[in-house]
């Protein structure tokens, strides 16, 4: 809004030209979403309590989790609402990548909202049918990937695939890239959803990943910097920095309420959308494989579930005491706070490793 309404007035008020700068709008997008979450947090939590949107705790889970029964869920509306309001104020809506991210946020957020509603209000533990949920995730992801494919910011890089520590594309996937990109978005969405099982774990990890991707969107969208670092130049990527900054601010604000002991959970409303955002940004800036490193916690959490299910069907035995793997550590005697902080530390290390892949050669 500010970009479109105030920037055109720069010929009359020279100070307003500041709204053209990505760094300025990113900083205030982060502050705006942070303040919104902090100011609205208790109000939203009381509203969720009043509507009885409470978390159902699994009987088979760690016994320490039973005390969490009744904690409001669907707190993702707070995160997503703050991000969208912040982008409405500070974003550039002539950038189609921003519009794609807004679409992913709304669609996956609504899917998660319905899932949370069915679980908490209708008391159906399964929520939305897994097949229906996956189908809708795939539809949203294919649509996003197809738009990026059809209207690339840099046509020469539209379908290329890069791997970390190698400063040139290794293959051009052509139309198959749409399938690959869709898998990245769906996988990221579900991986964050699986990680959301301990107070502060998912949102803290999302924050560190968002910081790295925010840095990468800025670098990728800057012609001289991308040329120096030997990374693909994607002109529209620069504006994604504003979106990622808004996400970082909202995530930090939510962590204020979601840290142990949590007074609200993000629910599928938050986790499905946040994972989708992360995956969508990765495909837009050609960092699909890079996401495997910086989002390594999400990858391990998802793999632990896949391994557990596959091995149990094959042998009738379990590899882990419980999956996802954060519950395995809990059942092994680690306090919840220790599991969360140690995974945060690992996530930060992985983030540093991802950034270290820049300008290797």
Image: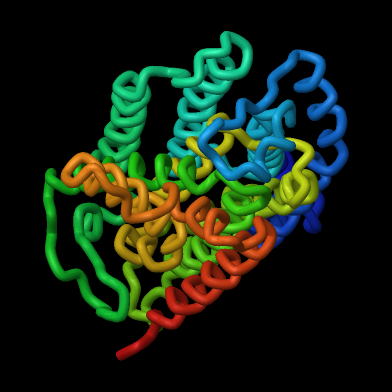
Q: Position of residue 183 (x, y in %)?
A: 27, 43
Q: Nearer the viewer, residue 67 or 350?
A: 67
The number of numbered discs placed on residues in the rendered structure image is 0
- Would you say residue 109 is visible in this rendering? yes
**Extreme-front residue of the structure:** 316
**Extreme-top residue of the structure:** 122
Q: Position of residue 249 (x, y in %)?
A: 71, 52
Q: Is residue 55 above or below residue 335?
A: above
Q: Is residue 82 above or below residue 325?
A: above
Q: Nearer the viewer, residue 122 or 21?
A: 122
Q: Is residue 73 left or right of residue 305?
A: right
Q: Is residue 327 above or below residue 75?
A: below
Q: Is residue 241 left or right of residue 135?
A: right
| Residue found 44% across the figure and 48% down from its top | 322
Q: Quadrant of the N terminus?
A: top right
- Would you say residue 236 is visible in this rendering? no
Q: Position of residue 230 (x, y in %)?
A: 33, 79
Q: Position of residue 129 (x, y in %)?
A: 37, 18
Q: Is residue 117 left or right of residue 256?
A: left
Q: How is the image coloured?
A: rainbow
Q: Nearer the viewer, residue 121 or 219?
A: 121
| Residue found 73% across the figure and 45% down from its top | 258
User: Residue 3 occupies which quadrant of the picture?
Assistant: top right
Q: Quadrant of the C terminus?
A: bottom left
Q: Nearer the viewer, residue 185 or 29?
A: 185
**Extreme-bottom residue of the structure:** 361
| Residue found 52% across the figure and 42% down from its top | 274
| Residue found 69% across the figure and 59% down from its top | 337
């Amino acid at each position: 809004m500010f970009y479109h309404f105030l920037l055109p007035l720069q010929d009359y008020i020279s100070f307003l030209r500041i709204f053209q700068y990505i760094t300025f709008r990113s900083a205030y997008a982060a502050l705006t979403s942070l303040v919104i979450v902090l100011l609205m947090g208790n109000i939203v939590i009381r509203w969720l309590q009043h509507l009885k949107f409470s978390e159902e705790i699994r009987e088979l889970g760690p016994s320490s989790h039973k005390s969490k029964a009744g904690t409001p869920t669907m707190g993702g509306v707070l995160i997503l609402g703050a991000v969208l309001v912040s982008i409405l104020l500070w974003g550039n809506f002539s950038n189609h990548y921003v519009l794609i991210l807004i679409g992913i946020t709304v669609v996956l957020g609504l899917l998660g909202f319905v899932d949370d509603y069915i679980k908490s209000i209708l008391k159906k533990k399964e929520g939305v049918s897994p097949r229906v949920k996956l189908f809708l995730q795939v539809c949203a992801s294919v649509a996003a990937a197809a738009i990026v494919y059809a209207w690339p910011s840099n046509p020469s890089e539209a379908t290329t695939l890069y791997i970390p520590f190698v400063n040139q594309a290794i293959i051009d996937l052509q139309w198959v890239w749409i399938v690959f990109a869709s898998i990245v978005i769906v996988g990221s969405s579900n991986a964050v959803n699986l990680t959301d099982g301990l107070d502060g774990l998912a949102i803290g990890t999302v924050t560190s990943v968002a910081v790295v991707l925010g840095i990468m969107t800025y670098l990728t969208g800057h012609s001289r910097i991308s040329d120096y670092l030997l990374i693909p130049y994607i002109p529209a990527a620069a504006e994604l920095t504003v979106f990622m900054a808004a996400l970082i601010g909202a995530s930090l604000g939510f962590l204020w309420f979601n840290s142990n002991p949590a007074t609200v959970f993000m629910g599928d409303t938050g986790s499905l959308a946040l994972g989708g955002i992360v995956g969508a940004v990765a495909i837009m800036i050609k960092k699909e494989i890079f996401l495997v490193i910086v989002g390594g916690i999400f990858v391990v959490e998802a793999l632990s579930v896949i391994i557990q299910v596959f091995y149990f069907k094959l042998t009738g035995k379990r590899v882990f005491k419980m999956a996802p793997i954060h519950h395995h550590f809990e059942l092994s005697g680690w306090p919840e706070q220790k599991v969360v902080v140690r995974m945060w530390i690992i996530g930060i290390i992985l983030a540093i490793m991802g950034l270290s892949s820049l300008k290797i050669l």
